[in-house]
Every structure is written in C-alpha cells, then in structure tokens.
Image (tube, rainbow, N blue to C red):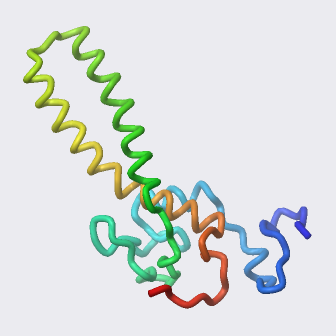
C-alpha cells in the first residue's frame, strides 16, 4: 500500500519500520549536499576519502555510504556536459577570433581536462545524494551489513 500523506514516501513493506517509511528525504537538498562533497544525510561529513573514493561511513553522522552504485553515471554526465560546453565555446572562439589551429587545440585541451576534473567528483557526489534520497541500492534499509 502506498500512503498519500506528505510524510509517507515509500510503499509499505514488511521489512521496513514505520520510522524509516515516514522519514522524508528531500531530493534537491541531498543532491546539493552530494555536489559539495558532503554527506547527503547531515550535510557536514565528507563523503569522499580521496578524489573519487567514497568513504564507507560519514565521519560526522555515521550514515552508511558504501551502498552507493554510481558506476559510470558520473563519467557519462561529465562527458555530456563538458562536450556540449566546449563545442559551443569552440564554435564561438573560431567564429569570432579565428586563432591558429594549434593554439585552439592546446587551449581547449587544457580546458576540457580542467573542467572534467572539476566536474567528475561533483557529479559523483550528486549521484550519491540522489541515490540516498530515493533510497536506492540499500540506502533505505534500516540495518544493512557492509558488502566486502
């Protein structure tokens, strides 16, 4: 049964407690926290222990983060965004300034690499925030064991 109240956000299942079912997880806030590299639950602890390595638990609130399954999604979104932005920038640059091809190639190569390195951890954090908010991949389970 799916409840129609504002506090109930998931279907009733026998293995979920009432507290877990009624806890609201705002999607926008969780994605924004993940974008900043913060825990989607508390917004304080860092979710990354390295550049792209996700910590098993939030150091501030101890929220389990090992459930995340970002896989290739952040890389795909990063390539999609960087490709579109650089294509527009290249078109405008070539139309207005007509730089030498080697100058344009070197400049845009550095720009593509810098923008991709900037966006990749943010996309991964945002995807982890989305998964946490939507209770995907075990983020909704009350007491799950780590997978090793």
Residue at (47, 71) in percent of width and height? 39
Seen in the picture, residue 128 relative to 117 is either above or below; the reply is: below
At x 62%, y 65%, the residue is 133
- Position above or below: 13 against 97: below
Q: Position of residue 67 (x, y in %)?
A: 52, 76
Relative side of 53 to 146, left or right:
left
Q: How many labels does the image show?
A: 0
Position of 133 with respect to 81 (left or right) is right
Would you identify the image quadrant in which residue 121 lies? bottom left
In the rendering, at what x and y percent does residue 108 appear?
19, 31
Query: Does residue 84 sit above or below 118 in this rendering?
Result: above
Rendering coords of residue 48 (x, y %): 36, 71
Quick one: 145 or 125, which is closer to the camera? 145
Quadrant of the rendering where the C terminus is positioned: bottom left
Quadrant in the rendering for residue 93: top left
What residue lies at 39% left-to-right and 30% top-to-bottom? 84
Task: Identify the residue at horizontal 41%, vertical 72% (top origin).
Answer: 47
**Residue 1 as seen in the image, left or right of residue 99:** right
Drawn side of residue 59 relative to residue 50, left or right: right
Please identify the quadrant where the N terminus is shown.
bottom right
Quarter holding residue 24 = bottom right
User: x, y (%) of residue 85?
Assistant: 36, 30
């Amino acid at each position: 049964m799916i409840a129609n109240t504002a506090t109930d956000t998931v279907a009733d299942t026998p293995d979920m407690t009432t507290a877990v079912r009624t806890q609201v997880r705002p999607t926008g806030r969780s994605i924004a926290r993940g974008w900043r590299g913060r825990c989607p639950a508390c917004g304080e602890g860092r979710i990354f222990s390295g550049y792209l390595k996700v910590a098993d638990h939030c150091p501030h609130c101890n929220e389990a983060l090992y459930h995340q399954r970002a896989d290739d999604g952040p890389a795909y979104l990063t390539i999609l965004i960087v490709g579109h932005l650089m294509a527009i920038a290249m078109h405008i640059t070539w139309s207005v300034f007509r730089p030498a091809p080697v100058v344009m190639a070197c400049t845009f190569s550095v720009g593509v690499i810098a923008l991709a390195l900037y966006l990749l951890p943010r996309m991964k954090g945002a995807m982890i925030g989305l998964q946490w908010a939507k209770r995907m991949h075990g983020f909704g389970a009350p007491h799950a064991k780590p997978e090793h």
